[in-house]
Image: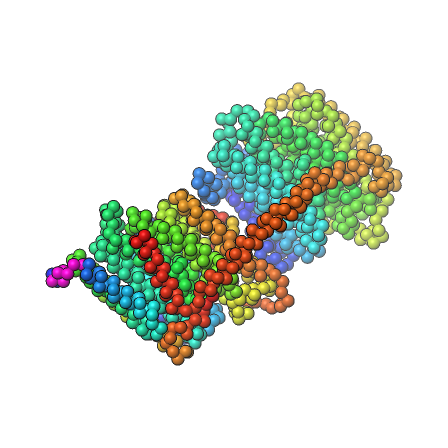
Amino acid sequence: MEHLKMLPIEHYIFLSTILFCIGVAGVLLRRNAIIILMSVELMLNAVNLLLAAFSVFHGDAAGQVFVFFIMIVAAAEVAVGLAILMVIYRNNHSTDIDLLSKLKW
Amino acid sequence: MTNLVFLVPLLPLIGFLLNGLLNNKISKNLAAAIGVLSVAGSFAIAAGIFLQSFHESSASHTIQYCTWLKAGSLTIPFEFLVDHLSMLFMLIITGVGLLIHIYSAGYMHDDDGFNRFFAYLNLFMFSMLMLVLGANYVMMFVGWEGVGLCSYLLIGFWYKNQEYNSAAKKAFIMNRIGDLGFLAGMFLMFSHFGSLSFAEVFEKAKAFSTNDTAIVGITLLLFIGACGKSAQIPLFTWLPDAMAGPTPVSALIHAATMVTAGIYMIARSNVLYTLAPTTLKVILVVGVFTALLGSFIALTQKDIKKVLAYSTVSQLGYMFIALGLGNYNAAVFHVMTHAFFKALLFLGAGSVIHAMSGEQDIFKMGGLRKHLPITNITFFIATLAISGFPLLSGFFSKDEIFVAALSYSPLLWLPISILFFLTPFYMFRLYFLTFYGEYRGTQEQMDHLHESPQIMTIPLMILAVLSVVGGWINASLFNIHGLEHFLEPVFRNYTLPFSSEGNEILEYGLAAVSLVVVIYLIWLTNNVFAKKEAENLAEEDMSFLQKLSYNKFYVDELYAFLIQKPLDWISEKTYEFIEVSGIDQIVNGTGSFVGWSSNTLRKLQTGHIGFYLFAMVFGIIMILVLNFII
Amino acid sequence: MTVLVLLSVLGLITLFSGFSSDKKLPIYLGIVGLAVVLGFNFMGWDLAHNAYNMVVADNYSIAFTTIMTFSTIFILFLLPDFSEKVEVPLAEITSLLLFTLFGAYLMVSYSNLVMLFIGIEILSISLYILAGSKKSNTASNEAAMKYFLMGSFATGFLLFGITLIYGATGSFDLGTIKTFVTDHAADTSTLLLVGVILMLIGLAFKISAAPFHFWAPDVYQGSPSLVTGFMATVVKTAGIAAFFKLFYTCFIPLADSWRTTIWVMAALTMTIGNITALYQTTFKRMLAYSSIAHAGYLLLALLALNNLSATAILYYATAYSLATIASFAVLITVHQAKQSHSLDSFKGLAKNNPFLAVMATIALCSLAGIPPLAGFFAKFYLFSAVIKEHFYWIVVIAVLNSCVGIFYYFRIIVNMFSPTAEQETIEVSSLYKMVIFVCIILSLVLGLLPDLILRCNL
């Protein structure tokens, strides 16, 4: 594990932040629900990476355990999300989120 | 027994909830049963507490249930004060209330709103009991407002009649003016004593000197509240109009109980009032003038209930005279006897009105004694009692007030002797016009004439018995001081020194004089109003004084001129200059601005997730930028 | 801990009781089970049982879980006669509601950020399904999708915040974080501050505080009404309780760096919620905006952060939940009769069904904050807690907003009591009647005896 510490922690923070921002940008810019879902996953993975880095940095296992929790929760979330998407696809025959704008004002 | 006291107000409340919620779903008989039984239960418990009090060493219990309100240094517990004063009032309220509930079951029987009526009556009982049981001014005020509300609801009970509605409104507004005084008094009290509970306030009051400005201010403000509730000058004009309500209501609320709330409040605050002789003088003067004015107006009224209403105003004036003299005993004593005979008079009047198919003009009655024997006898007894015929209840209580007044100052001789004549005069005028002489009503009414059913006459008889013997519990003429001793724990040290020893001659004199006066007036009124054909003067033919009295001293018109007109003028001008050209513009402007912004903000909710996400990220960026970069 | 196990087992039992031929069995099982859970929950009062430094059952969590459980019981009572077409078996709806409640339990009893995250996720994932439970209804689909996308997006920020806090303090444990923050109050790293702000954002999303409130009106409108009622009460209560607990225990020393944010957020939330509610034409959407506005008032407690705040939130959440459940029960009943959520469908309700009209009036008055109802004292205590900390302007804004609130609540009351030509009877099922009545009575009782809750020692 020691060789992981060769890089200063700031590098990990910057990398994760950039990954996170790419995820955010993906959510904002894409209109396909599946791609948005993938972008959210990217955000979560950026967090996972950072958690693992901090975990090593602090020499504390809790961070890495938390990564597993996040992965499981993310899997559950994606399962539910895809199910919702399926239902919508059956009714709309599209995964474009811009079609979902009947509820407004 | 004392720990059951919570049931006393609770039972009528349950009755109210049952009758109010089930309203038209239950039969009239069941509604009446609920109403009567709940009050009967209260009465039984009140009586139990009363009887038990003779075996107890401590005369006063404060029962605290929980903290009711807490805001800063103000803590208002939900607590009941059971002492001899509240016990006595509890007995009067539940006892007379029970009789009137029974009577109402007969009187209101054909009314569509029967169940609603009982719901309101029970709500009234609840509020009134809260008023007398509350152990702090806030709880008293809650009851105070509650009875005001019930009075409003019951005056306007026949809400389809617009005139009745305005009478209800008038009563409510006049009461609100008084309530404002009460409320301001409470605020002032809190700022000086830091508490609103009786025990604490009275304890702390001992540190104040006599006629301390704070105490005088508080007592005067509270007195304004009492003026409103107990119909004293200048806030009395609502009471006669309140007669629009059903007659049992007039008996219960506007004669026996609610209107005496002011007297209860002042008697309860005796510690404060004794410290403020200035206020007592004001009360005395107001009481004297109200008593006189009420009697004068009662002389010429044609409506049977109006006569009784003005007589109530005048009798309440007596009680305030007693309070003003610092003789709280006499005031409470008169509250009690008055509850008996005035309730009886009203119920008798109700019986007459019932028999006459709703007619209230005494000039259209006459000769009813043959048709309504029981009502006639009981009404006669009540008339004797209120006139102060020796040995009846009214005699003893009035006697006590008069003796106190006469020995207080010779200045009171004149008004007292006028009152001495007026009360029997207007009462016997009423009595003879109604029950003697020729029948002056229509044939149709004649055919309907009947004595009321037993459910109405039995309460009359019970009240008649009470009107006869009720005074003997404190017949100072015969050295019986039952009530005085009973109330001693409450008024101890605070009743102004007054010895009855030196006044024996005065007492016997008064008794003799009242005997002569009443008999003389019976003879006189009998001659004028029964033997001769009663003449129903048209207003043009009246003398100046008669006119003055008949038109109730033009007090309503005076208020209209002094208050309503200027207010109208001011409000018209303010309306034109400030309202229309100023506030309206601002208000409408604000309104349309809010409406406009609502419509604009609404559009922000576009329905597109994309936009929502953007807005969210924008928000996040703004927060981060504002927090960390600037 | 026992309570959590019981609750999750209860969720499973109700799920599998769906195999029974009695379709309503799961609901009754759920109600009985929740009553048992309540009992166990209450036995922990004053014990502050701590399970492995992960969850702690102190009085704060017991008080909040109790009112949330009561709200859930009320909602379950409304479920058997719920008339909207939900294409998910009742057993699944019941167990999802119970799992959501489980998440809410975790959210108020966590003592470790991991538990907070898991609580939020259990709550949210169950809710995504509940929101979309009218499968063939496009509005319900849309609500579920919007809620899901925005919810998981917000989770990302919450997690990033947790991670940064972990990075700065080296622990997820509230106690450790608190000690760290107190020790380093003078020289806080930017890492920690950004983490706190990001967590604030994630939690603000959950309670639908502006500018993260956009999901709320659409999701509330599209979801089945009963689920909306559940979201507006249980979920909102859990959100604000979790929010308050985190900031009250850990981040008071850093208050200077986030108080302004909360201030602006609270002001924005109540203003946007109240003002937008004015122009709504359907009752359901109006209640959604009103719930946003109430979130704004609740945020005031985070501004005050004194010893009065916790009880003030508890009282407010109770009063608000009671009135909201009653309003939703009325809404569902009226919708069933008129097939419309529009404000016009309330016209003449007073004549057609006086009971419903009176109850709805009291509920709305409580929401508007008219004395002597619970809603008034709720606002009163919340505002006085803030005034005690000398935040005057925000209270002025809140009071002005309450006035706007009165306007739109009373518009419905006026509608109900205005005459209509139509004479039709509106059937109210006895369960609905009972729930409405109990909620209203409790609102009155709490209004008259606020001390019942305020004396809770949190």
Residue B279 at least partly seen: yes
Q: Is residue B495 above or below residue C178?
A: above
Which quadrant holds residue B535? top right
Single out the residue that lies furthest toward the left.
Answer: A2
Picture coordinates of residue C7, whole percent (x, y): 34, 62
Near-viewer residue (B438 or B40): B438
Horizontal side, residue A4 vs residue B223: left or right? left
Magenta region: which residues? Answer: A3-9
Q: Going 83% across and 49% down the picture, which residue do you hit?
A: B441
Picture coordinates of residue B121, whole percent (x, y): 63, 49
Q: Going 46% across and 67% down the picture, which residue do you hit?
A: A104
Q: Is residue B284 above or below residue C183?
A: above
Near-viewer residue (B307 or C419): C419
Question: Does residue B498 show up magenta in the picture?
Answer: no
Single out the residue that lies furthest toward the top.
Answer: B502
Picture coordinates of residue B143, whole percent (x, y): 57, 43
Which quadrant holds residue C108? bottom left
The secondary structure that dominates the magenta segment is helix
Near-viewer residue (B467 or A70): A70
Near-viewer residue (C57 or B604): B604
Tell me the colour scheme of the image: rainbow
